[in-house]
Amino acid sequence: MRLSRTTLPNLPSSIARPAYDRQACGVGIVHLGIGAFHRAHQAIYTDDALAAAPGNWGICGVSLRSPAVRDALSAQDGLYSLAVKSGGGDSYRICGAVKEVICAPDDPAATLDRLTDPAVRIVSLTVTEKAYYRSPGIGGLQADDPDILHDLEHPKTPKTALGYLVEALARRRARGTPAFTVLCCDNLPNNGASLAAVTAGFARLRDPGLADWITANVAFPATMVDRIVPATTDADKDSAAQALKLEDTGAVVSEPFTQWVIEDVFPTGRPAWEAGGALFVTDIAPYEQMKLRMLNGSHSLIAYAGYLSGCTYVRDAMADRRLAALVGRHLAAAAATLTPLDALDYAAYGAALVARFTNPAIAHETYQIAMDGTEKIPQRLLVPAMHALQHGQDVRPFAFAVAAWMRYCLGRTDDGQSYDLRDPLSARIGAVIAPAGDAPGSIVNTLQGIGSVFPAPLVENDIWRAEVTDALSGILDNGMAAAIDMEAARTGATS
């Protein structure tokens, strides 16, 4: 028997369930990119908001690629379980905030109809960094990308989130319908302003007047989201079925920690997300920088060094004493690049991150985190590296993490097994790195010359180049596992 509206009463009494009338709750939010992270994060906050202050804030989830989530949730009336996993055991709850799911490639007209519905007041997104078509390192729209060109030529059948946003806003403008608020929940630097810039840039290629209208009428609040949500496995679904006594093909899992910091700019209203613990602020930048440089930056170190040293999961990397010590070194170096603020305790945040990464119940794959490196490393590693250089701080932690990424770009493990880089610049990386062979200096020069990933001041800095080249030499000469040991011993990070 499967989880659904009719089987919901059959759940064990220990399973938390929606504490509001779902039937009376209309759709007021469209979420683009309804993957596991959204269902374990923003949808849970919305579920709590609806319980505290019921209203028309149900979610229409939109998949921009696969029909898998639509097929799983539509058969369950949008219901699914979240398992919160820790060393102390698992707890389950049923989320009811998702009212419907659309697969955009299968039905672009229905997607645009929902986006233009006057009842929809917020459109949120978790589509990963690469789906915003920003030029790496410098921002701005990649106007020559084939998907962008397609959406400009075929506005009624777009492929991208930007295409859907701009077409929907164009229709709302033409009909005199108020604009919705656009809420980016991805790890872009200054994500609200970044999304506003590429949205207006896309619109300007269609109609300068539309771009001006969007700039004047559409709010793009900045956000910072934080929760570790690994990909759901068959074992996770089996565990959910045992706990629920029902089949749940939409099950998701997460760690206990969750955080959502939001710039409170919602001209047409919002749910009471603070009921779920969301923090509304006027300046999100300190929280964003803390998360990008500390959590995401150390995650990138773990992903590349961990994957290449045989660690399947983050928890495995943290079980390696030397690699865990390098993570601690990286967290301290990243914290040193942040502006001291009374409201934020960076040391405590770093200690909490170590505990979260070590959680034995969370199977977060290093290979999953490693994808899309050219989209991630600028804000996670390169920006703090420049700050460290400018302020006379130790740049080695960032250089080692970048060297680990460069070694990862070779596409093979130390024993010769190949893997897919899963990066938007994979083809270009493969084409330019082959002639470099295994010469560290050539690899560094080649990869630092790709597109606009690496900022010129960093590329031209002799200290930076020497540190990255030295770190990469150690990795190539000795293998990643031995290089981690040597790096920890070299820096004294051995405990």
Image (cartoon, rainbow, N blue to C red):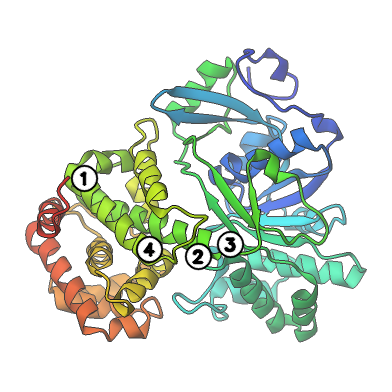
Residue 259, numbered label:
none
Q: Is residue 38 above or below residue 25?
A: below
Name the amino acid type tagged 3.
Ile
Disc with the residue nearer the chain's start (2 vs 1): 2
Q: Secondary structure at mark 3?
A: loop
Mark 3 vs mark 1: in front? 3
Label 2: which residue?
130
Q: Secondary structure at mark 1?
A: loop
Disc with the residue nearer the chain's start (3 vs 4): 3
Residue 27 appears at what percent x and percent y? 80, 45
Name the amino acid type tagged 4.
Gly
> Disc 2, disc 1: CB below 8 Å?
no
Q: As rendered, which of 287 and 45 lies closer to the eye?
A: 287
Disc with the residue nearer the chain's start (3 vs 1): 3
Residue visible at 18% across and 42% down?
Answer: 321
Instruction: Say left or right for 238 vs 369.
Output: right
Label 3: which residue?
284
Residue 265 appears at what percent x and percent y? 73, 62
Label 4: which residue?
373
Q: Please identify the quarter of the rendering in which residue 234 is found.
A: top left
User: Which image quadrant: the N terminus?
Assistant: top right
Q: Secondary structure at mark 4?
A: helix
Label 1: which residue?
310
Residue lying at the far front in this picture: please name it: 342
